[in-house]
Amino acid sequence: GENVEQHPSTLSVQEGDSAVIKCTYSDSASNYFPWYKQELGKRPQLIIDIRSNVGEKKDQRIAVTLNKTAKHFSLHITETQPEDSAVYFCASRPGFQKLVFGTGTRLLVSP
Amino acid sequence: ETGVTQTPRHLVMGMTNKKSLKCEQHLGHNAMYWYKQSAKKPLELMFVYNFKEQTENNSVPSRFSPECPNSSHLFLHLHTLQPEDSALYLCASSQEAGEKLFFGSGTQLSVL
């Protein structure tokens, strides 16, 4: 079955720096890749997603890139702010209805 | 109320108890999901319902029994659980199965 690996598990940056989180997947049939943000004690929330026919997608300070050949996709956050501090999860969709999640990255943005 | 609502928020139960988790979505979505979130583990898919029909059972032990009476409500019936079942149980819904999931706040379950 699909396996999603996420790195790093913890990332500390200074406010204003960029942050990059990377995920790799195993199933070449995967065609949809969302990213979720989970603040402490709150629900995971979708922040951006990308389909396999697109190489890059951007929404204000966040962007996602996809390399289908290498089977990896990355989340890029620019000009980080303290409110970006959270756990970020990547996921891939190997089948019609199933999302497989990575283990999460705890991002800490220091003022 | 809008979004996905889960009750109870917290639950403590003994290994011999029977309890149920409830999820209700007010988004008009067609698909509903149960996920298990444990510390330092990825979100684990348990069940998927699409138009009230179960379409995915991710090898979940029979002590977890889902029920989906309609496309707005989802239950997870629990019986004879083990301490290792302690986790945050998240319900989610989506318009199209398998994408743009909207999560509830979860039920934090402790099995003693």
Image (tube, coloured by chain):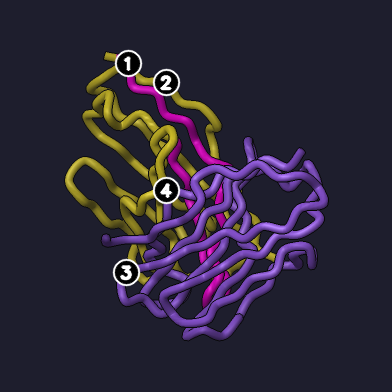
Chain colours: A yellow, B purple
**Same-subunit check for callouts 1 and 3:** no
Residue B32 position within the rendered picture, expressed as x and y whole percent measured from the top left: 48, 71
Q: Residue furthest left?
A: A60
Closest to the observer: A55 or B102? B102
Residue at 23% over, 22% down: A16
Image quadrant where residue B77 sits: bottom right
Q: Secondary structure at mark 1?
A: strand
Q: Is label 4 on the same chain as label 1?
A: yes
Q: Which residues are magenta?
A: A87-110
Nearer the observer, disc 2 or disc 4? 4
Helix, strand, or loop for circle 4? loop
Q: Are marks 1 and 3 in contact (CB under 8 Å)?
A: no
Residue A26, visible in the rendered structure: no
Q: Residue B26 shows which numbered tag?
A: 3
Q: CA distance from mark 3 to mark 4?
A: 17 Å
Which of the numbered marks, if any, corresponds to residue A110? Answer: 1
Q: CA distance from mark 2 to mark 3?
A: 37 Å
Numbered circle sitting on residue A44:
4
